[in-house]
Image (spheres, rainbow, N blue to C red):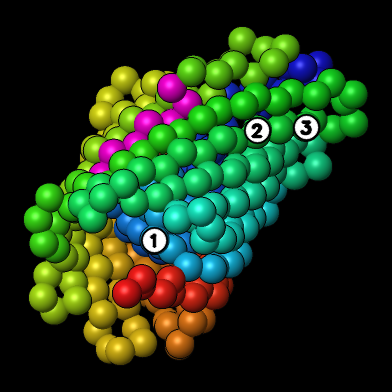
């Protein structure tokens, strides 16, 4: 019976694409269009994004569809070292009957002025009640961000290329591949378009995000994604090295999901 419940709950989680990502409110506000994002916010999305990041720490909470039992908590940290940057991500999803946690360790660096690359290894753990059975899996990620022209970026990432399987089950961690482009405008605004394919889906998901500063310390973001349609809106407040981000998204089938992220990030000093 426990195993049967595990399979049902696991299937639900596998079909909910976001559940296998460490994420933040900024990414939620853009409906997940984060392939070209850099800095602390990129942790959990494209592993190449932290290549030039400084020291940083963030904590996030997601009230998924206003159901406490499926809320998600995430923690992310960036540590520059060895001409690049290490990143650590942790997220927890679920409740006492069923829960999942993921721990990820990544490293990214700039291969040239125009090209950034990164890799990440993830450990997935699943628990059901007081069952002695341990379900887990390992997966990997790789990503690139290219800047072919000024204020224009192209991002690519591939998650779980090995098609890892959760032990003692027939369930697999989904393979995710994404390609995105980002255009930054002179007035501190930007637009992002991304296509993403999940091995558990039959359709390609399209994501579009826009954002920009409206005041020195305030930034607004909005996004939309398909399959199913999700509309998102968010706002960020930044003061020196501290930032707090709020977002709310609406899945047309499941309802609203508010989220919040608090972070501290120190910009990496440029080498002279």
118 lies left or right of 230: right
Dot 2: element: strand
Dot 3: element: strand
**Which residue, given by chain and number where applicable, does mark 3 sit on?**
127
Q: Residue 202's quadrant in the figure?
A: top left
Query: Is 41 in front, or is 116?
Result: 116
Q: Within the magenta stretch, is there residue 158? A: yes
Instruction: Please identify the dominant SS of the magenta region.
Output: strand
Image point 45% across, 88% down: which residue? 239
Badge number at residue 171: none
Badge number at residue 124: 2
Image point 58% across, 67% down: which residue? 57
x and y percentages locating residue 140 in the rendered image: 51, 30
Mark closest to the chain's N terminus, 2 or 1 = 1
Image point 72% across, 31% down: which residue? 126
Badge number at residue 52: 1
x and y percentages locating residue 251 in the rendered image: 39, 48
Query: Is 128 in front, or is 163?
Result: 163
Image position of 49 with respect to 167: above or below = below
Few, some or many C-alpha atoms within 10 Å of disc 2 (few <14, some 14-19, many ≥20)?
Answer: some
Confirm whether residue 193 shows in the render.
no
Give the CA separation, mark 2 to mark 3. 10 Å
Magenta residues, start to end:
155-161
């Amino acid at each position: 019976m426990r195993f049967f419940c595990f399979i049902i709950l696991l299937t639900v989680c596998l079909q909910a694409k976001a559940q296998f990502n460490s994420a933040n409110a900024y990414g939620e506000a853009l409906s997940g269009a984060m392939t070209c994002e850099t800095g602390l916010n990129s942790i959990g999305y494209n592993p190449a994004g932290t290549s030039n990041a400084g020291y940083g720490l963030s904590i996030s909470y997601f009230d998924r569809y206003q159901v406490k039992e499926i809320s998600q908590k995430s923690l992310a940290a960036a540590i520059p070292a060895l001409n690049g940057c290490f990143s650590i991500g942790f997220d927890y999803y679920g409740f006492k009957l069923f829960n999942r946690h993921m721990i990820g360790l990544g490293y990214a660096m700039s291969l040239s002025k125009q090209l950034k690359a990164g890799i990440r290894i993830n450990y997935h753990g699943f628990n059901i009640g007081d069952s002695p059975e341990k379900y887990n899996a390992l997966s990997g990620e790789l990503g690139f961000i290219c800047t072919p022209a000024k204020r224009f970026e192209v991002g690519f990432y591939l998650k779980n290329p090995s098609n890892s399987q959760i032990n003692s089950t027939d369930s697999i961690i989904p393979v995710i591949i994404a390609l995105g482009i980002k255009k930054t405008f002179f007035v501190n605004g930007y637009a992002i378009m991304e296509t993403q394919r999940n091995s558990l889906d039959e359709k390609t998901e399209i994501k579009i995000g826009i954002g920009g500063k409206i005041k020195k310390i305030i930034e607004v973001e909005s996004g939309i994604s398909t399959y199913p349609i999700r509309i998102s809106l968010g706002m960020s407040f930044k003061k020196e090295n501290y930032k707090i981000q709020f977002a709310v998204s609406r899945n047309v089938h499941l309802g609203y999901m508010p989220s919040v992220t608090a972070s501290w990030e120190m910009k990496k000093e440029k080498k002279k």
